[in-house]
Image (spheres, rainbow, N blue to C red):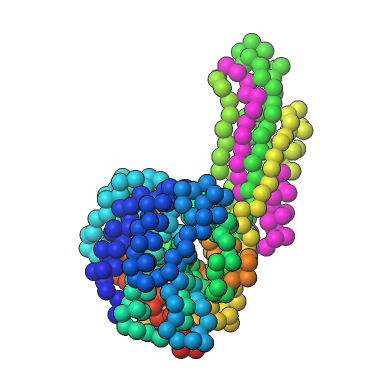
Amino acid sequence: MINKERLIDSFIEMVKIESLSRKEENIAIYLKSKMEDMGIEVHIDKSSAKKAGSNTGNLIGRMKGNKEGIEPLFFGAHMDTVSPGDNIKPLIKEGVIYSSGDTILGADDKSGIAAILEALSCIKETKVTHGDIEVVFTIGEEIGLLGARFFNYDLLTARKGYILDSGGTPGKIINQGPAQDNIKAVIHGKAAHAGVNPEDGISSIQVAARAINNMKLLRIDEETTANIGVISGGKATNIVSDNVFLEGEARSHSKQKLDKQMAHMVDCLQKACEDMGAHLEYKRENAYPAYFVAEHESVIEEAIAAGTRIGLNVQVKSTGGGSDVHFFNAVGISTVNLATGMNNVHTTKEEIRIDDLVDTARFVMAIIEEHSNR
């Protein structure tokens, strides 16, 4: 039975601990101590800290099974939060936990962490039969899935599991996510005095405007999106701008469509530069690969059975967002993303219903039970 008050207290305590990306050490120390008090063996993946530039590494916990022959299972969430995430003051009003209004709350993703640890506490207290249960708490998720990208997967024995890092009502299972490619570009124009001899200049801002105006952006089709999210350049109004920096992305569930969209965006930049006499430099990088987990795979079948048994509205859906799930699937670990009930994430209006937090912990516990009984 989930201990509601303990879960709330644990969540409140966690969100008060500052843990911005690359500054997760304090929450890692807290979680390591908390897991060890539960009898969970904890390892810090120090190599991930160095590669991600964080002051700590991923945490890997292992609760040893009390029965042989049960396949290991893992649950994960990320420790870092976005800004503004300092001095968080959580408030409870009418069954909902909010921030005070000038910071995020940190339910993304400490709701996932709190639910996992509460479920494991209950498993231990009620002596539920289980195999080895592994826990992965990652760093740097909010700045490029860095913890999952640089994770030492040799430290994990489980070949399937669940990341708790999605908005929506508990019971939602995310089984498909797109690949994302990023583009960083610099348009080199030619400086000139804007009032004396502007005809001698080449405005990089004007070139960028033409390129972006010719791009197909935002919703491309049901599988594909694209965006130019950063543009900067120029020194003063009386100088024809010589350099502009652009940063954008495209996402798609189809590699062919992703390649086509990225080629289109590059073509627009190149043509605008050629037409107006500017020079283009750009770099394209893959942020993360696409993933798809079929509904007949056991990781989904067990979650559906568990959620249905405890009365959740179970739904299997795809997403346009990214999470640690991408990299776990990329190395052959069958992984899906579970909703925790967090809402308005990455804003000062972030909130989570206490009932959803409880249901998330119930869902984790039910999955462990379902997995152990199969």
Q: Position of residue 14 (x, y in %)?
A: 33, 58
Q: Position of residue 95 (x, y in %)?
A: 24, 65
Near-viewer residue (212 or 292)? 292
Q: Residue furthest bottom?
A: 374
Q: Is residue 233 left or right of residue 111?
A: right
x 70%, y 40%: residue: 282
x 58%, y 29%: residue: 233
Q: Is residue 213 in view from this perspective?
A: no
**Vertical relation: 101 (above or below) 242:** below
**Vertical relation: 275 (above or below) 349:** above
Q: Is residue 263 magenta?
A: yes
Q: Position of residue 153 (x, y in %)?
A: 58, 65
The picture quadrant where one finds residue 270 is top right
Span shown in magenta:
237-266
Q: Is residue 362 left or right of residue 218?
A: left
**Vertical relation: 198 (above or below) 294:** above
The picture quadrant where one finds residue 357 is bottom left
Near-viewer residue (162 or 182)? 162
Near-viewer residue (194 or 148)? 148
The picture quadrant where one finds residue 243 is top right
x 69%, y 52%: residue: 261
Q: Is residue 8 left or right of residue 202?
A: left
Q: Position of residue 6 (x, y in %)?
A: 26, 68
Q: Is residue 2 in view from this perspective?
A: yes
x 40%, y 70%: residue: 40
